[in-house]
C-alpha cells in the first residue's frame, strides 16, 4: 500500500529532483522604503533585489523614485512610496521581471475595458519601473488625517483587547492628540508624525507625571501605530524603536499581623461590606479588580468554588476556603447575573465601569481605614493579598521544604510559572533570612 507519506519520499528519491527542490530560492527580496530618516533634502525611493538569471545571485535593482521627490511634505512622500512598494510587490508576485521585456505579460493581464495610461510612462510598458510609477493624485488620495488614522486603529482593536484596555487606549490617544495640536498645529496627515515628535511627547509625560506612566504611553502608542503599519496606513512603526526607561515599580507594603488584626477588628464594627470585600482578596488571593468582576453566579456554595477572570484574561476557578465560606451570606435568593459587590451591599446592579467600581472601594478603604489609621500611599487593598500570601507561605514552610511549599503555593495563588512566583515572593520579601550575627564575628 502506498500511503501519502511513502509517496512523498518515493517521488523525491531521484537525487536531481531532491537537490532541485531543496535549493529552490526566492526570486526577489521584499521591496522596502528608504526615507533618509525623514530628511526632505535627500532623495527617497523604493529599493529591492532580484535574482540574476545568469549568476543566480540576488542583485540590487534600480531604485524607484517616480514622482516622490517632487513632493514637499513627508506625508506625500510616504503615501507615494507606500503605493509604489505595494504595486511593485504585486507585480513581482505576478511574474514581472526587471531582466526581461514585460510587454506580453502586461498585455495578457490587462482588461481592455479599463485604460491605465495615467499610470504608465508609455502605452506599451516594457520595464518593471514603468509599470510601478504613479501620478500625484494616486499617491495622495488615500492619506488619512491624524484623527482619522488613530480612530481607525482604536476601532480595529475592538474585540482584541478588553473594554477596560480599549478605554485606556482612547484616553491616552486623546491626550497625545491634544499635545500634538498644541505643539505641532500644522501636522494634519498621520505620516507627518515622526519619532522626534513622539519622543518629545513622552518626555513631557515623564516630567509631568512619572517614568512608569511614560512607559505606559509608549506601549499604547506603539500598539496603535503597529495597527497602522499592519493596515498599510503608515510605512513603519517607528515607536517600537523607542526604548522604555527604567522606572521604580509601585510597592504595596505588607501589613504586620497586628496591623491586619486591628484593621479587621475595626471594620467588623464600622464597615462589614468592605471587610468581606477585603476577605475575598485575603483568603482567595484575588486582586481587587478581580473581586469587582465577580457576579452572584460565579460563587458555587455547594461545590465550594468560585470562577473569575484573571489578569491574563483567562477564566479561572478556585476553591473557596472554609474560612471564607462561613462569612458568605445567603445567595440563593439573589439574581445570578447581579454583581456580588455593590456600594449598597451584596448582590445588585451597578451602572459603573469596572475600573470605577474598583476605585470606589479603594476610596472607601482610604476614608474608612487609611485616614483613620494614618497609612500612607504605600498601603492599600492590594497589600492584603501580599500579607496573606506571605502568611500562607511561611505557614507551609513550617512543614514542607522550600520547593514543596512553593509548589503548593502556586496552586493557591494562581501563578502560572515557578519563576513568576519566585519573583513575586522576592518582591514582597515573603521570606527573610535567619539572624546571621554569628557569621560576622
Image (cartoon, rainbow, N blue to C red):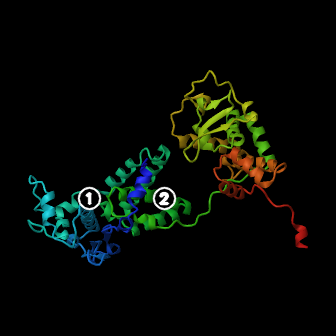
Residue 224 visible somewhere in the drawing: no
Rendering quarter of residue 264: top right
Q: Nearer the viewer, residue 251 or 379?
A: 251
Question: Can you say which quadrant of the picture contains the C terminus?
Answer: bottom right
Q: The residue tagged with tag 1: helix, strand or loop? A: loop
Q: Going by the picture, which residue comes out furthest to the front?
A: 1
Find residue 327 and report its horizontal and vertical position in percent: 73, 31
Which residue is at a point 79% across and 43% down the rendered structure image?
262
Q: Is residue 120 left or right of residue 261?
A: left
Q: The residue tagged with tag 2: helix, strand or loop? A: helix
Which residue is at a point 61% across and 30% down the rendered structure image?
344
Rendering quarter of residue 198: bottom left
Find residue 253 and report its horizontal and vertical position in percent: 71, 54
Find residue 21 and report its horizontal and vertical position in percent: 36, 64
Residue denoted by label 2: 219
Q: Nearer the viewer, residue 297 or 75?
A: 297
Find residue 83 and report its horizontal and vertical position in percent: 25, 62
Q: Which mark is residue 143?
A: 1
Check the image and report above or below for 323 versus 104: above
Amino acid at each position: 500500500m502506498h500511503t501519502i507519506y511513502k509517496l512523498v519520499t518515493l517521488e523525491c528519491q531521484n537525487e536531481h529532483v531532491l537537490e532541485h527542490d531543496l535549493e529552490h530560492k526566492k526570486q526577489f527580496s521584499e521591496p522596502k522604503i528608504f526615507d533618509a530618516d525623514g530628511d526632505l533634502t535627500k532623495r527617497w525611493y523604493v529599493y529591492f533585489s532580484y535574482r540574476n538569471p545568469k549568476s543566480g545571485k540576488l542583485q540590487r535593482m534600480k531604485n524607484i523614485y517616480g514622482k516622490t521627490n517632487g513632493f514637499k511634505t513627508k506625508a506625500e512622500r510616504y503615501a507615494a512610496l507606500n503605493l509604489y512598494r505595494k504595486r511593485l510587490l504585486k507585480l513581482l508576485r505576478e511574474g514581472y521581471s526587471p531582466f526581461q521585456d514585460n510587454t506580453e505579460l502586461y498585455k495578457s493581464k490587462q482588461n481592455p475595458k479599463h485604460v491605465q495610461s495615467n499610470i504608465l510612462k508609455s502605452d506599451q510598458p516594457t520595464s518593471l519601473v514603468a509599470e510601478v510609477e504613479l501620478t500625484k493624485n494616486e499617491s495622495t488620495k488615500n492619506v488619512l488625517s491624524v484623527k482619522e488614522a488613530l480612530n481607525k486603529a482604536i476601532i480595529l482593536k475592538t474585540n482584541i483587547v478588553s473594554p477596560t484596555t480599549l478605554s485606556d487606549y482612547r484616553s491616552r490617544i486623546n491626550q497625545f492628540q491634544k499635545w500634538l495640536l498644541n505643539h505641532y498645529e500644522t501636522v494634519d496627515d498621520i505620516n507627518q508624525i515622526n519619532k522626534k515628535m513622539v519622543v518629545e511627547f513622552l518626555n513631557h509625560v515623564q516630567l509631568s507625571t512619572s517614568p512608569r506612566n511614560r512607559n505606559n504611553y509608549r506601549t499604547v502608542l506603539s500598539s496603535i501605530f503597529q495597527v497602522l503599519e499592519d493596515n498599510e496606513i503608515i510605512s513603519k512603526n517607528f515607536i517600537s524603536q523607542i526604548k522604555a526607561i527604567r522606572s521604580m515599580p509601585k510597592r504595596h507594603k505588607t501589613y504586620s499581623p497586628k496591623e491586619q488584626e486591628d484593621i479587621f477588628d475595626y471594620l467588623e464594627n464600622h464597615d462589614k461590606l468592605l471587610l468581606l470585600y477585603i476577605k475575598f482578596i485575603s483568603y482567595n488571593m484575588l486582586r481587587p479588580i478581580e473581586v469587582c468582576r465577580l457576579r452572584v453566579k460565579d460563587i458555587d456554595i455547594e461545590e465550594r468554588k468560585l470562577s473569575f477572570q484573571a489578569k491574563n484574561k483567562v477564566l479561572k476557578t478556585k476553591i473557596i476556603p472554609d474560612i471564607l465560606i462561613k462569612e458568605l451570606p445567603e445567595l440563593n435568593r439573589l439574581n445570578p447575573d447581579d454583581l456580588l459587590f455593590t456600594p449598597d451591599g451584596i448582590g445588585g446592579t451597578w451602572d459603573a465601569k469596572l475600573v470605577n467600581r474598583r476605585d470606589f472601594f479603594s476610596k472607601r478603604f482610604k476614608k474608612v481605614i487609611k485616614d483613620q489609621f494614618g497609612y500612607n500611599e504605600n498601603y492599600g487593598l492590594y497589600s492584603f493579598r501580599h500579607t496573606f500570601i506571605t502568611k500562607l507561605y511561611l505557614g507551609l514552610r513550617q512543614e514542607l521544604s522550600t520547593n514543596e511549599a512553593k509548589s503548593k503555593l502556586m496552586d493557591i495563588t494562581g501563578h502560572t510559572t515557578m519563576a513568576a512566583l519566585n519573583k513575586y515572593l522576592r518582591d514582597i520579601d515573603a521570606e527573610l533570612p535567619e539572624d546571621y550575627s554569628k557569621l560576622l564575628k
